[in-house]
Structure formats: structure tokens, C-alpha cells
Amino acid sequence: MSETVYTVESDAYLTAALARLRTGLPTLAPAWFDTLPRHLPRAWFSDRRRPDWEAALAALPHVADACIDARQGFCLRAAGGLAAAAEARVRTALEALTPWRKGPFSIFGIEVDAEWRSDLKWNRVAPHLPELTGRRVLDVGCGNGYYAWRLWGAGAGFVLGLDPAALAVMQFRALWRYAHDAPVVVLPLPSAALAQPLAAFDLALSMGVIYHRRDPLAHLRELRGALVGGGQLVLETLVVRGEKPLLPAARYARMRNVWVVPSPGLVRAWLGQTGFDDVRLLDVSATTTAEQRSTAWMPYESLAECLDADDPSRTVEGYPAPLRAVFMATAR
């Protein structure tokens, strides 16, 4: 049997997603679309698990009366319900796409309890969001699109999510196939795809990304370039108390590529240096095992295994346990 070769030209999802993006955001410069192929991660085409993921997606049943309600959570339902055989096919497909990192999702009555209770973070952020009706929103590092759906449910006119993790985008695809013409798209792209200033979005979110970037200022410049003047940024990051940033020697809470854990004051300075004003600290919360934990849908190590068993205020490396801050700023 010949091996399936995936290319930009043969990728039906990319074709459909980009077509919806062009329609939903006609102000995006055509030249930007030409740059996207070089930013697509190699894993999107070469991940050895992709044939299995594609098979799982192909096995999902057609549901003519499917509808999504993302106002109070994410709920995908069929008006007439699903037959037992169809529901079993859905469950099998969703299980083939584990681990689910962000959620929760209710999918035809199947409760996908992801590692992260992303609804808790949404509840901390949502009260501070500007009026979203008709707004163009960018979510960088969006994972499987949980927040993108919630933003749409809150009234956004169009939401574009970017995430280089192939499995996360596959999970989004499993839901998107039932979304009909919902103005939500997730592309398998890193934030480097924003190197060309777009000036196309009214609101941008970057949650849990900046500390993974070697150059945090470059990331903030990408976000500033994506926004229109007066547009707003929601930035969520790990922080440390006090004024001295933490520079992990190797790993932080078992995470690779955590280059810097800034202080809130340093984040404010970064934002000021990269074209943002009116910086506000909205929330500071310790991450707990009620919000991040192992589940049947993510049956691997989670936060509990990253903390010192004798002192949960410290990571296994001896650093302060995860503390997350949410900032909002306005593009000048």
C-alpha cells in the first residue's frame, strides 16, 4: 500500500478553511495568503499519526440537523438526537484524537472532559472583553479552538485561531465539520505567520504562549502588527511575584521551552515597548489541580505530577508553582 502524501494543494481542509477566511476577512492582504505555505509546520504533513487522525475524521457520521451553541459553553447537538450506532462512531473518533488538552466540550451528548477546564479561564477573562458583536478576533496559540468557539458564541463577527500543533487542529476539524458556515477558522500555523503586519483585527488573544518564545518582544510586535490602531490585546502569561523574572535552567513544571517567567512589572514594560498603551492587570490566579488535571480524555501526567509532592507551592524543579496573570492593553 502506498503511503499517503499530504501537500498544500491536496489538503481539502486547508483549502476550505482558507476560502472561509478570505470570505470572512476580505480586508486581509492577498499577499499574506501567499506567505502561509512556508509557515506550515512540517508535522502537519509528515506526522506519522495523521493517517489515523484522518481516518477518525472520515468515520464521523453525517448529521444534517447538527447545531452548535457556544454561548454558555460548547454544546454540539442534533435536533433529533443521534442513533446509538452514530453516537458510538462519534465517540470512537473523538477517542482516536486524544489527548484533549482544552475543553470541556459536549458533543452529541458525549462529555469531553479535557485536561484544562478552559471554561474557568474564560470566566476570568470574559467579563473584561470589549463588545464583540461583529468584531474580528485573532486567537494565537488557540489549541483546539475552545476559546475561538466561545468568542464566536459571545458575538464575534469572525474568529481566526492559529496553532502549530497538528492534533489540536484535527480536534477542531472534528467539530468544524458540523459548524456549517460558522465564522470560525483554525489554521495549523505558528505566530511567526504574523510577521507581516496585517492591521486586520479588533481584538487579539495570546494565552499561554509568550513564555515559550525566545524573544517575547518579537511576539508582542507580531500581535501589535495584527491589530488595527485602537485594537485590544488580551495577554495571559505565567508570572512570578516580585520584580525579578525567573529564567528556568532547563524545565519549568516539566515544560520544555519556558525561556522566561516575567514579573507583572516586566510584562507592563514589554507592552509599552511594543506599541501598547492603557495596560491593565485583570487577574492573577494560581493554577490548581481543579483547573488542570488528568482525565479519561487526557490520561497522562498533568499538573499534580509537576509539583513537589511535599510542597505543592513549588514545582518539581524547585521553582514557584505556576501563577498566571491576564493583561489587557490597547494598540496605539
Image (spheres, rainbow, N blue to C red):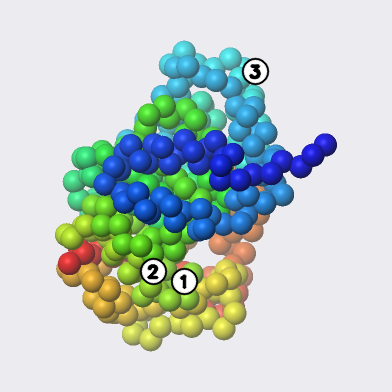
Residue 112, by quadrant, is top right
Residue 85 tag number:
3
Residue 51 pos. (x, y %): 69, 40
Other-residue count near label 3 (Cα within 10 Å), few / some / many at <14 / 14–19 / ≥20? few
Q: Earlier in the sequence, mark 2 or mark 3?
A: 3
Which amino acid does the dot numbered 3 rest on? Ala
> Can the viewer see residue 150 in this picture?
no
Quadrant location of the C terminus in the rendered image: bottom left
Disc 3/disc 1 C-alpha distance (Å): 45 Å
Nearer the camera: disc 2 or disc 3: 2
- Which label was assigned to residue 213? 1
Q: Specify few, some or many for label 2: CA neighbours under 10 Å numbering under 14, 14-19, or 20 or more.
A: many
Q: Amino acid at mark 2?
A: His
Above or below, comparing residue 201 to residue 133 in the picture: below
Image label count: 3
Question: Would you call the spot at circle 1 few (<14 residues within 10 Å), some (14-19), or many (20 or more)?
Answer: some
Residue named by callout 2: 219
